[in-house]
Amino acid sequence: MKRLLVLFVLVAAACSGTPQGIEVSNARVWVPPGSTTAAYFDLTNHGPGDDTLVGVESDIARAMVHRTMMQDGQMMMQPAGPVAVPVGETVSFAPGGLHVMLMDVPPLGVGDTVELRLLFEQAGTVTVEVPVVEIETP
Ligand SMILES: [Cu+2]
């Protein structure tokens, strides 16, 4: 009986230490210099399977997933389309690459937060409260 109890405790500990689904970390929105700004974060897929980010929503702005790329020596950005987040991997949204474009944003200051809803094929809607931070310089 005692051995069974020990086994149960071990299993419970193992389960609670293994997060499932999509983890959003390092999320931040750059303080808008005007009516447009960008949000960045890391997406980690803890399983059980591959997932895809298919969209993003905000109540205070128009939100789109964009990708920045060099084209003919110019920095261009365009809609990224669905973004694959394979199981066990982390996909970074970072300056110069993937980002969430926020358009028609109201005035925001450092310390404010913006709620974003990230829409995944498998995980469904993942809601994050994203802090507004100073624009990062490289
Ligand atoms: Cu953009």
Image (tube, rainbow, N blue to C red):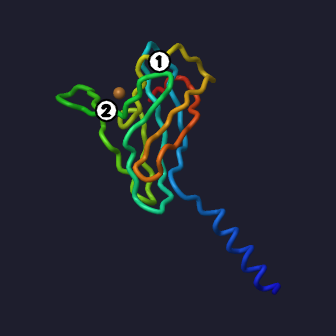
Disc 2 beta carbon < 8 A from ligand 1? yes
Name the image quarter holding residue 54: top left
Give percent across and percent down for residue 20: 55, 58
Q: Earlier in the sequence, mark 1 or mark 2?
A: 2
- 115 left or right of 10 in image: left
Amino acid type for the residue under numbered disc 2: Thr
Q: Amino acid at mark 1?
A: Val
- The residue sitting at 41% across, 28% down in the picture is 63
Residue placed most toward the observer, 21 or 37: 21
Q: CA distance from mark 1 to mark 2?
A: 20 Å
Q: Quadrant of residue 13?
A: bottom right
Circle 1 residue = 105
Residue pictured at 53% horizontal, 37% vertical: 27
Element under disc 2:
strand
Above or below, 8 against 95 in this view is below
Instruction: Indicate the quadrant containing the N terminus: top left, top right, bottom left or bottom right.
Output: bottom right
Q: Taking 128 as reference, is 63 above or below it?
A: above
Q: Crowdedness of circle 1 by 10 Å Cα count: few (<14), some, many (20+)?
A: some
Report the residue at 58% width, 34% height from top.
129
Residue 131: image x %, image y %?
58, 29
**Which x, y percent locates residue 70?**
24, 32
Left or right of 65: which side holds 115?
Answer: right
Compared with residue 29, is residue 107 higher up or lower down, i.e. above or below? Answer: above
Q: Dividing the image into four quarters, tell me where ligand 1 lies.
A: top left
| Residue drawn at the location 78% of the way across and 85% of the way down | 3
Ligand 1: does it lie within 8 Å of the C-beta at label 1?
Answer: no
- Disc 1 secondary structure class: loop
Residue lying farthest to the right in this orientation: 2
Give above or below for 53 relative to 30: below
Mark 2 — residue?
68
* In this rendering, the label closer to the viewer, 1 or 2: 1
